[in-house]
């Protein structure tokens, strides 16, 4: 058995690590000269997207012997609309770094490899690799790589604007903003890396050409709003923008001996736009199938369900006006509503859908 993995991201590396734990190795082909997400940012990994995994770090460690060290845990998420603010608290998830950071999840996974080799600066294609290997894992992170082989159902293309910012932050508190004035049908969020540094981002669908043209204008308003909310002057260190970021899912998780993992599979959840848990799980599941320890199509069914539930919730939020979002946020002051949204034994996506139903039906 000879396995090739195209892409050294979260999905590809988690696949390689799992293969090694079962006595197999893989050749990993990475087109960049080093591993890591192309932007230096923080991301959120949360059970909101993948119930009933309440603690992803513990889950990966105890279930799959994959060990990750997050930057910090999240105890409280503040939700802000145009005129209202509220929060939910509990063990809400973890903040982790991406990109060239020394403790990025990609680099942590690569350190757990023993025998598998990463071929850097190698623009391997599926067509070429499939001739030499018995199994191919497509983990490029680019849906276009999937589209060359099969149907990839795109739910939306998103635009991002963001930056590493300096300020005075509480490390285990996350802030989110829902305001159509600067993030139409999308959101803004602030994820602290430390007491003095954070990632600030706005992300929204590219449904209107005008929205993409106004991205800089929206971004400036987001920075002003974050400064007002946190009652401090937030300063920008390093800015970035992303356009045409595709969120969708493939039709077949496996075709022959080719496995589609990570964003080539559809690991990015439409609601919040994060995909770390789904990417890592898809890589693990592909490795288990290759080792004869499971059926990839069956293992992926919960990931498809998470994606579909997340998309339903996203469409509901997209339909809310600023006034309706104010009402939703205001309802979070009710302790029973907060419990419904964060109840550990209940799908949080389902709880949020119940919360939004009265507002979206009006």
Image (spheres, rainbow, N blue to C red):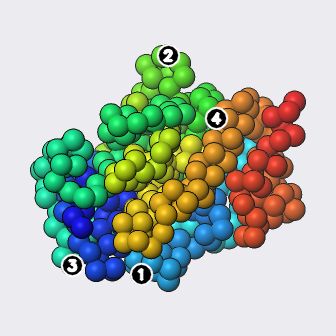
Q: Are marks 1 and 2 in contact (CB under 8 Å)?
A: no
Q: Can residue 242 be seen in the rendering of this structure? A: no
Mark 3, mark 2: which one is toward the viewer? 3
For disc 1, the marked residue is: 65
Quadrant location of residue 182? top right
Spatial separation of the CA atoms under disc 1 and disc 2 = 47 Å
Spatial separation of the CA atoms under disc 3 and disc 2 = 49 Å
Residue 165 pos. (x, y %) = 39, 50
Q: Can residue 2 be seen in the rendering of this structure? A: yes
What residue is shown at x 37% (from left), y 34% (from top)? Answer: 147
Tell me which numbered mark, 3 or 2, is placed earlier along the sequence.
3
Instruction: Decide: is 162 above or below 254.
Output: above
Q: Of helix, strand and loop, which one carries label 4?
A: loop
Mark 3, mark 4: which one is toward the viewer? 3
Q: Are marks 4 and 2 in contact (CB under 8 Å)?
A: no
Mark 2 Cα within 10 Å, few/some/many (few <14, many 20+)? few
Mark 4, mark 1: which one is toward the viewer? 1
For disc 3, the marked residue is: 114
Instruction: Decide: is 297 above or below 84.
Output: below
In the picture, measured across the screen, residue 295 lies left or right of residue 230, that is left
Tell me which numbered mark, 4 or 1, is placed earlier along the sequence.
1
Residue 244 pos. (x, y %) = 40, 30
What residue is shown at x 56% (from left), y 43% (from top)? Answer: 270
Mark 1 Cα within 10 Å, few/some/many (few <14, many 20+)? few
Spatial separation of the CA atoms under disc 4 and disc 2 = 17 Å
Q: Nearer the viewer, residue 273 or 78?
A: 273
For disc 4, the marked residue is: 179
For disc 2, the marked residue is: 210
Q: Of helix, strand and loop, which one carries label 3?
A: loop
Q: Of helix, strand and loop, which one carries label 2?
A: helix
Tell me which numbered mark, 4 or 2, is placed earlier along the sequence.
4
What residue is shown at x 79% (from left), y 43% (from top)? Answer: 356
């Amino acid at each position: 058995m000879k396995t090739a993995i195209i892409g050294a991201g979260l999905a590809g590396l988690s696949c390689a690590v799992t293969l090694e734990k079962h006595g197999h190795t893989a050749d990993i082909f990475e087109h960049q000269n080093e591993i890591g997400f192309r932007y230096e940012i923080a991301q959120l990994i949360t059970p909101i997207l993948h119930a009933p995994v309440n603690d992803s770090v513990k889950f990966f460690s105890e279930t799959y012997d994959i060990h990750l060290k997050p930057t910090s845990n999240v105890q409280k998420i503040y939700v802000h609309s145009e005129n209202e603010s509220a929060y939910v608290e509990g063990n809400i998830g973890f903040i982790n770094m991406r990109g060239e950071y020394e403790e990025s999840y990609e680099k942590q996974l690569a350190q757990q490899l023993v025998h598998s080799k990463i071929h850097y600066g190698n623009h391997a294609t599926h067509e070429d690799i499939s001739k030499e290997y018995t199994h191919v894992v497509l983990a490029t992170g680019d849906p276009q790589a999937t589209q060359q082989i099969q149907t990839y159902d795109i739910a939306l293309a998103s635009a991002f604007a963001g930056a590493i910012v300096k300020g005075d932050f509480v490390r285990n508190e996350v802030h989110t903003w829902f305001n159509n004035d600067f993030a139409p049908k999308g959101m803004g969020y602030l994820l602290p890396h430390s007491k003095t540094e954070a990632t600030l981002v706005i992300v929204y669908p590219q449904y209107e050409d005008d929205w993409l043209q106004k991205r800089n204008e929206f971004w400036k308003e987001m920075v002003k709003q974050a400064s007002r909310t946190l009652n401090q002057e937030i300063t920008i260190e390093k800015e970035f923008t992303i356009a045409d970021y595709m969120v969708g899912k493939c039709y077949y998780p496996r075709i022959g001996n080719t496995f589609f993992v990570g964003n080539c599979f559809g690991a990015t959840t439409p609601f919040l736009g994060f995909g770390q848990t789904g990417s890592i799980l898809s890589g693990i599941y592909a490795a288990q199938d290759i080792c004869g320890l499971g059926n990839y199509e069956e293992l992926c069914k919960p990931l498809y369900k998470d994606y579909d539930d997340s998309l339903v919730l996203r469409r509901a939020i997209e339909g809310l006006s600023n006034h309706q979002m104010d009402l939703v946020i205001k309802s979070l002051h009710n302790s029973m509503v907060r419990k419904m949204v964060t109840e550990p034994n209940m799908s949080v996506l389902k709880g949020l859908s119940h919360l939004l139903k009265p507002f979206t039906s009006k």
